[in-house]
Amino acid sequence: MKVLVLEDSSTYRKIIKNYFSKNLVFIDFYFIASFEELKNLKQSYDLYIVDFVLPDSQDGRHIEYLLSKKKPIIVMSQYDTFKNSPYKNRIVEFIIKDKYALDYLVTFIKRYYKNQNLNAIIVDDSRMVRNYVKKILLSIGLNVDEAKDGSMALDKIKTSKPDLIITDLNMPKMDGEELIENIRSDYTRTELPIMMISDEKVDDKFLKALKLGANDYLKKPFLKEELILRVNNLLDIYDSFQSIKGKLQLDNLTGAFNRFFLETTLDNLFMIHETKSIVMLDIDHFKKINDTYGHQMGDEILKYFVATIKNNIRKTDYVVRYGGEEFLIFLPDATKEEAKKAVEKIKNSLTEYKGVKYTFSAGIADEGETLPEMIKIADKRLYKAKETGRNRIVID
């Protein structure tokens, strides 16, 4: 995911850059300082974070420019005057530059990143409401489908399980209550969250729907900001429950933990331990192995490699498939010197597989205040190991 930050203050750009590098892992950030630079860009980005007022665009022309190109925008400002701006309902989010701004911004970006892989279904007999809600959900990165009644929604759920249902209560054919009952016969509250939106005036109706299995509700009319906050909070809870399920945290091929585990559980484990190390490993010339012996042999070598790693580390260590032939090992209560001994043990235990000889390179770090920061340091050292001849371990 690529994010562009448009901020004219060099000081605030530096603050944002340092904060993002410590707290965001899988996101590439680019920085510019003016509307003129924005207009000259050839590349497109997944998300734009822009200052409200720029020296060469004090009337919001840079915002209008991005909106005309249908770009998702987060606007930041020192003042809350933007709340009265004509752009307010056309952007993704507005953040005041107070002491909480960067914390919230990081949380929002993480959620936006995850939302791109999630699917929501809007169920409402009003096309106008469906369009309005759909526009908001699309703006926060979700993939969106729609249904005009409960019966149509159930058909869609059967063919492709969504991650979120937003439904009205009063609809023809099958109303919201019956829809919730049908969904809950197959999925629990933690497996498929449901949010109600309705102009129902009687609170008893909402209470009944909650008892039937809805997770949350909103009364019409509602603010865009409230829907965004409630949806994102609901999905955060959903993610937390999903992270408990081990099968969703494991890479199907190798049995190592996957990136979902890395983004959720491991981030929490990292903060628990005062001393810890990260090892980044990459199988040398893996593409050549695939090209020479075929992808099936490549897959078998990946499984054998992970098995070798697991046989030579402690039960308290974690192996994560970071991507392709690259793996990460998290070693709690271990310095980088101790981690190096573990990697050397793996290297000495590695044997050829079905006649195929192979090696790996590794970078190790115990520096860094956050998980993303330590990963980046270890990754740089892995790159150094590969650049200086491969089949080696770098810790400095």
Image (cartoon, rainbow, N blue to C red):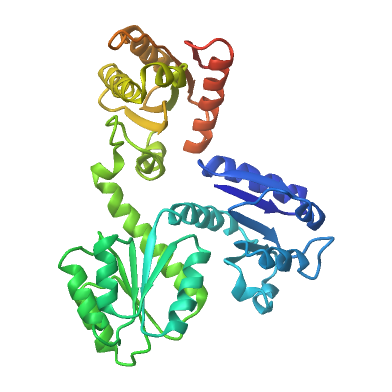
Q: Quadrant of residue 324?
A: top left
What residue do we see at 25% from left, 71% from top? 154
Q: Is residue 78 above or below residue 169?
A: above
Q: Where is residue 243 in the image (x, y as percent from the top left)?
A: 30, 48
Please state the total of marks drawn on the protein image: 0
In the rendered structure, the answer to whether residue 52 lies left or right of residue 291 reads right
Please state which of residues 11 and 286 is positioned toward the viewer in this rendering: 286
Q: Quadrant of residue 192?
A: bottom left
Q: In this view, does 37 lie above or below 343?
A: below
What residue do we see at 61% from left, 50% from top? 3
Q: Where is residue 25 in the image (x, y as percent from the top left)?
A: 51, 41
Please state which of residues 370 and 121 is positioned toward the viewer in this rendering: 121
Q: Position of residue 372 (x, y in %)?
A: 50, 37
What residue do we see at 80% from left, 71% from top? 59
Please state which of residues 305 and 353 is positioned toward the viewer in this rendering: 353
Q: Where is residue 396 in the image (x, y as percent from the top left)?
A: 56, 17
What residue do we see at 54% from left, 31% from top? 376
| Residue 370 in sight | no
> Which residue is outermost to the right?
56
> Which residue is outermost to the bottom?
201
| Residue 137 in sight | yes
Please state which of residues 198 and 337 is positioned toward the viewer in this rendering: 198
